[in-house]
Amino acid sequence: MVIGIDASRANRKHKSGTEWYSYHLIKELAQLDDKNQYILYCDNLLTDLIDLTTEGKSQQFVEFDQDGFQKIKSPHNNFKAKILKWPFNFLWTHGRLSLEMIFNRPDALFVPSHVLPIIHPKKSIVTIHDVGFERDKKLYLQKSLGSKNKNFQKLINFSVRLFTLGKYGANVMDYFTWSTLHSLKRAKKIISVSNFTKNEIKEIYKQKLKSNIFDKIKVIHYGFNNKIFKKIDDYDKISEILEKYDIEPPFIFYLGRMDKRKNVSNLVEAFGLVQKDIKDINLVLTGAADYGYDEIKYIASEYQLENRIVKTGWIGEEDLPYILNAAEAFVYPSLYEGLGTPLIEAMACGVPITASNIDSVIEAAGDSALLFDPLDTNSIAQSLVKIITDRPLTVELIEKGHNQASCYSWTKTARQTLQEIESL
């Protein structure tokens, strides 16, 4: 069987949740599967995935075969990539990938994140990570699709409204809703990354979809890179990495995008309250600045925390385990998640975690996290103080976290995903 995979997210330089999911699944499928042939579809030259036989990033030169496919080294020599150029910075999946499905359709198509192209094989499977955009649109940046040219935007908006009979416009929120509904209706199977997301899909779309559609949803949890996220006793290397990012212990660590949904502004305010009890602790925020970042900076300034907060920006996987191993605690204050890979990575590194008392976090962490109300800064602050000062508690959480993390791996995720693809 020829299996096509949308690898556009896996090829992004600064990866976060869905991008790492796509990247690691492709890597693991290359190790596991010696029967099927794979085509990776991308909007640009593949870089990180050129060599699937190695653990790290490949530094090889880009090469093409006589049929125009980008060459990829893989353990079973069954992967290649096709670069699908598209003149616009939007609708690559519905536009260019759909065209490819017309003229060169694979036997099956796997889309690792939400958006099934309008034209697709009958055997198609899509992963839906979360539907938070349906729960609280205020947590997401409201913006138009496509060009900054206003006339072009008007044309796109008119075309979309015409195509959808007036139900949707050319904005990101409508695009999320339409694409998710399209995937749920048209894909032969759906992968949900958690029971929480599966239940959310059922609850939110029960009035818009036939009930039998929900029967095709299979829950397959995220994994994590257990080759690097683990306890590390190379203290010289840990010190080197901390120095690289100007991180001074002791510190509390947050990993994730800095936006409204991740609730970092409440974390920063809570950290200001923590300073009353623990004055010599720092807060390290690692992740890309996004919608709501200005509010985070404002609160840090109001509490005069500039000298206590380190904003590292995005950091690649290779350095994160060393930072996690040096942290006093890991904090995850998100308001909405599909599952939350950073929680698993932190537990694997032996860091005590404190996190939001939301269903998806509880599903990911089990009883390994000290929970708080993410809307209550006092609750967050109290949890941070307790996890830093209560040594018996932290020892208990570390042990539970280690056991919980052992339930996850990308190999397990890939094996279950391959079973679903082959059963299409």
Image (cartoon, helix red, strand yellow):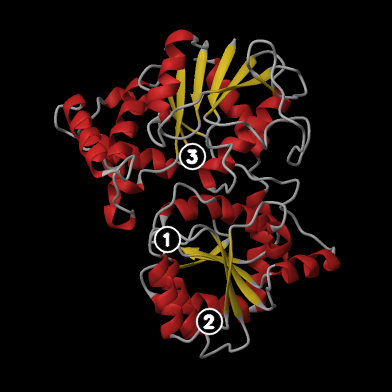
Task: Please report contact status of discs 3 and 2: CB closer than 8 Å, yes or no.
Answer: no
User: Marks 3/2: CA distance?
Assistant: 37 Å
| For marks 2 and 1 on the same chain, the one whose residue lies earlier in the sequence | 1
Task: Please report contact status of discs 1 and 3: CB closer than 8 Å, yes or no.
Answer: no
User: Marks 2/1: CA distance?
Assistant: 18 Å
Q: Position of residue 22 (x, y in %)?
A: 57, 36
Is 405 above or below relative to 389?
Answer: above
Front-lying residue, 399 or 112: 112
Q: Position of residue 35 (x, y in %)?
A: 69, 13
- Is 350 on the left or on the right of 11, as rendered? right
Is 93 above or below relative to 123?
Answer: below
Residue linked to disc 3: 193
| For marks 3 and 2 on the same chain, the one whose residue lies earlier in the sequence | 3
Residue linked to disc 1: 259
Q: Nearer the viewer, mark 2 or mark 1?
A: 2
Q: Residue 306 bears which disc, if any?
A: 2
Instruction: Determine which quarter of the picture holds residue 322.
Output: bottom right
Determine whether the residue tagged by mark 1 lies in a helix, strand or loop.
loop
Q: Position of residue 209 (x, y in %)?
A: 25, 28
Q: Amino acid at mark 2?
A: Glu
Q: Nearer the viewer, mark 1 or mark 3?
A: 1
